[in-house]
Amino acid sequence: MENINIPTIQQADLKGKVVLVRVDHNVVKNGVIHDPYRIDATIGTLFHIISKGGKIILMTHVGRPKDKKTGEINISEKTSVQPIVDYIQQKLHISLKIPEFYTHDKQGYQSIETSVNHLIRELKEGYIDGIYLPNTRWFAGEEAKGEEAERFANQLAGLADIFINDAFGSWQAHASTVQVSKYLPSYAGFLMQKEIANLERIYHPESPFLAVVAGSKFDTKIDSLFALLEKADFLVLGGVIYNAYLCAKYHFTIKGIEDDDMQHALEFVKFAEKFPGKIIELQYIIESDTMEGMIDGQHRTWNIKDIKPDTSLNYVLDIAKASFMESAVIEVFHQAKTIFVNAVMGYTPYFNEGTIALDELIDSNINAIKLYGGGDTMQELKRLLPGLYISALDSPNYYIFTGGGAVLKAIENGTTTGLAPVKALIESGEKLLK
């Protein structure tokens, strides 16, 4: 935290205070927690607040309950915080309550109603240990702009004395991550501090620096890929973005590549010409006639050198293991001192060969610092290589970020202070000093 003048939880006077904590507990899919890593990563912050005499009110977003086309907000068990509350209560042996609010027809919660006050009274008097607000995206003001967002942020701030942001993965500029900092003394939690500190290992990596990025859409990662191509010594691609790159460079077609992905890929290939030798191309790809798995007779492995221009391929759904057995690829991975990974190489859950081969090759470099972006990258590592996942959690050579998208956004910006929630904390800290 030396390079950034950000107020930290260690500086906050928490005794007897109601503390509003924004976490990134977005781990529920269809009402089930598949991996509690993001919850566990915030336990230190919660324990610190309670041990210093603070009273916690937690909040997180879960999924995408808002339909972007219609604006309707679907309040359902699938995006409820209840499974998170159940997990925390069992883990920490504390009691949490979720307030209930009136919902307008498919418009979500319009406000935080005064009915929450009786729970805050119970919290202050010690009858309960904490409050967990409903999914922040169930509130109309969370993703709104202007006055509506400010009103919701003001209501959130009215619940507490202090705001702690421990949600590094929630980098979007929403009411609960940014605007609320305007109305309360605001500090970074321990996880936020840890994520920022580890980002410095990407901003100032020990060379050679290898980045591995895969994705299902070029447009969500194009700007960070430009930044990584400039910063990294080597870049490895996977997923649809690699398919689009291959089509743009070698003039064949792959089924399922959309026009906008091709357009981005053409721009990227042109930009990459400035950095010859940086992109390490994985030679062997797996083509499939079906997306339902590796069915006999319906998939085949191609060497990209053997694919002639104007060839039309079916779906390319994975990188073959043979790609990671090439001596040139092994050399790049083994010589790297810093490896950043935000990548699932195959179409999940059926095509796993490339991801397993990638993670095993990375692990075979025992000296490198390995920085894994969160989300799907982390979940697939746990699903496919559970032993490696468990050892990585305890290894000083590994760090698993809780938010892969936030890391890519920070790389794209070139500085952590470019993330709106971090910037909001710094501005709040400047107010505290006045």
Image (spheres, helix red, strand yellow):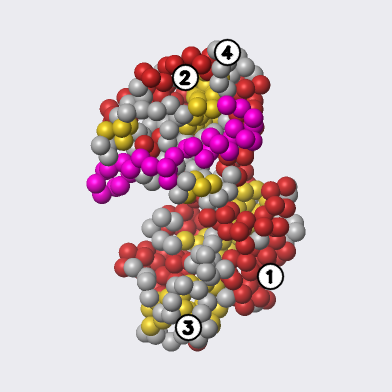
Q: Above or below — where is 43 with respect to 238? A: above
Front residue of this view, candidates 125 and 41: 125
| Left or right position of 142 against 11 | left
The amino acid on which the numbered mark 1 sits, given as a three-letter code, is Glu
Q: Nearer the viewer, mark 3 or mark 2?
A: 2
Q: Above or below — where is 76 with respect to 386? A: above
The residue that label 2 is drawn on is: 119
Label 1, secondary structure: give it: helix
Q: Which mark is residue 298?
A: 3
CB-based contact (under 8 Å), mark 4 and mark 3: no
The amino acid on which the numbered mark 4 sits, given as a three-letter code, is Gly
CB-based contact (under 8 Å), mark 2 and mark 1: no
Q: Position of residue 17 (x, y in %)?
A: 54, 15
The residue that label 4 is drawn on is: 16
The 10 Å Cα crowd at callout 1, few under 14, some 14 to 19, many 20 or more, is few
Q: Nearer the viewer, mark 4 or mark 2?
A: 2
Q: Nearer the viewer, mark 4 or mark 1?
A: 4
- Which comes sooner in the sequence, label 4 or label 3? 4
Residue 300 is at least partly visible in this image: no
CB-based contact (under 8 Å), mark 4 and mark 1: no
Residue at (43%, 80%) from the top-left corner?
A: 289
Q: Above or below — where is 350 with respect to 409? A: below
The 10 Å Cα crowd at callout 4, few under 14, some 14 to 19, many 20 or more, is few
Front residue of this view, candidates 249 and 133: 133
Label 2, secondary structure: give it: helix
The 10 Å Cα crowd at callout 3, few under 14, some 14 to 19, many 20 or more, is few
| Left or right position of 68 against 196 | left
CB-based contact (under 8 Å), mark 3 and mark 2: no
Q: Which mark is residue 331?
A: 1
